[in-house]
Image (cartoon, rainbow, N blue to C red):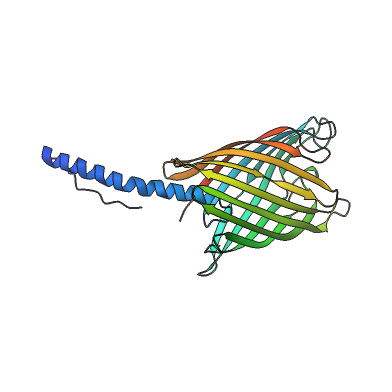
């Protein structure tokens, strides 16, 4: 946003300088609410997974008590760029990609460690630009790509399925749910098939200082093994601006309410840095 600047030149009188300072103060006061409102709107958009906003979340997750003897630990850095595209006057396409970078210790076997990229998940949300009955809606396909650099870091399968999202934003509140279902259709015949449903209900509250408090579950049901994975996440995030870069920092903890055999147990934590590139 551009603001006008008064012509306060060297050599002006004291009265002129005072007038200049007063004019500058009024200009700053007028510009500040607009800047605050802009950041508040960005915070609201970040609470919406299909907002028309280019962002690059870098999400770090740590979990432990994993593996055959519950001694393993796993660190995952999810690089999650979100790219919105305007298809028409009424429709957007939002492409959300999750690229996991994994480091795990004593998970595949005691004394073994693996590091590298896991399998990529990419969602394509077709979303009306205007809310429908007050709800923001989106749906489309999701792809699961066999991209792991180590056989222990991925499923060795290709998969696809549908994904959908519905949310409502009222004042400082955002309430909604994201879901998808993935079925494998190709890959290593010796590896287990993928048939999983992901359900993520979420609630977020944004304060006047652009602090966001959120709670969600990122639950997955494996239809092949009839097992649930249910981590409950609680997080707080703050909108910041460093130089020209707008960003959000998030800290959170999670508790594994349910997990399959050899899955994580107890508490884990999450840290996230989101870089924003508003139009």
In this picture, residue 177 sits left or right of residue 89: right
Does residue 93 lie above or below 242 as drawn? below
Residue 236 in picture, x, y percent from top left: 56, 38
Location of residue 85 by image quarter: bottom right
Is residue 166 shown to the viewer in this render?
Answer: yes
Q: Residue at the spot x=69%, y=53% of the render?
A: 121
In this picture, residue 111 sits left or right of residue 170: right
Of 130 and 11, the residue lying toward us: 130
Does residue 89 lie above or below 168 as drawn? below
In this picture, residue 256 sits left or right of residue 83: right
Residue 129 in picture, x, y percent from top left: 53, 64
Residue 263 in picture, x, y percent from top left: 79, 38
Q: How many marks?
A: 0
Location of residue 110 by image quarter: top right
Q: Residue at the spot x=29%, y=44% of the render?
A: 28
Is residue 12 shown to the viewer in this render?
Answer: no
Q: Residue at the spot x=59%, y=50% of the render?
A: 175
In this picture, residue 48 sits left or right of residue 240: right
Residue 220 in picture, x, y percent from top left: 75, 48
Instruction: Check the picture and name the quadrant holding the C terminus.
Output: bottom left
**Extreme-right residue of the structure:** 190
Of 67 and 157, the residue lying toward us: 67
């Amino acid at each position: 946003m551009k603001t006008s600047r008064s012509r306060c030149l060297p050599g002006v009188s004291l009265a002129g300088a005072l007038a200049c300072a007063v004019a500058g103060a009024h200009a700053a006061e007028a510009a500040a609410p607009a800047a605050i409102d802009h950041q508040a709107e960005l915070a609201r958009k970040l609470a919406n997974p299909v907002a028309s906003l280019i962002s690059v979340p870098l999400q770090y997750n740590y979990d432990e008590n994993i593996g055959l003897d519950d001694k393993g630990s796993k660190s995952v850095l999810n690089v999650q760029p979100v790219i919105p595209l305007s298809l028409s006057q009424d429709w957007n396409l939002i492409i959300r990609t999750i690229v996991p970078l994994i480091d795990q210790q004593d998970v595949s076997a005691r004394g073994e460690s693996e590091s590298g990229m896991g399998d990529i998940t990419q969602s394509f949300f077709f979303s009306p630009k205007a809310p429908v009955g007050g709800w923001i809606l989106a749906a489309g396909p999701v792809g699961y790509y066999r991209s792991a650099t180590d056989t222990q870091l991925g499923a060795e399968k290709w998969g696809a399925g549908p994904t959908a999202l519905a949310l409502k934003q009222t004042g400082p509140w955002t309430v909604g749910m994201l879901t998808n279902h993935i079925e494998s259709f190709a890959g290593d015949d010796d590896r287990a098939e993928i048939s999983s449903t992901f359900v993520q209900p979420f609630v977020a509250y944004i304060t006047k200082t652009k602090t966001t408090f959120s709670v969600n579950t990122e639950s997955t049901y494996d239809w092949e093994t009839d097992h649930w994975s249910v981590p409950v996440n609680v997080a707080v995030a703050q909108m910041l601006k460093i130089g020209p870069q707008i960003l959000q920092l998030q800290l959170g903890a999670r508790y594994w309410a349910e997990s399959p055999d050899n899955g994580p147990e107890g508490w884990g934590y999450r840290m996230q840095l989101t870089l924003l590139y508003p139009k």
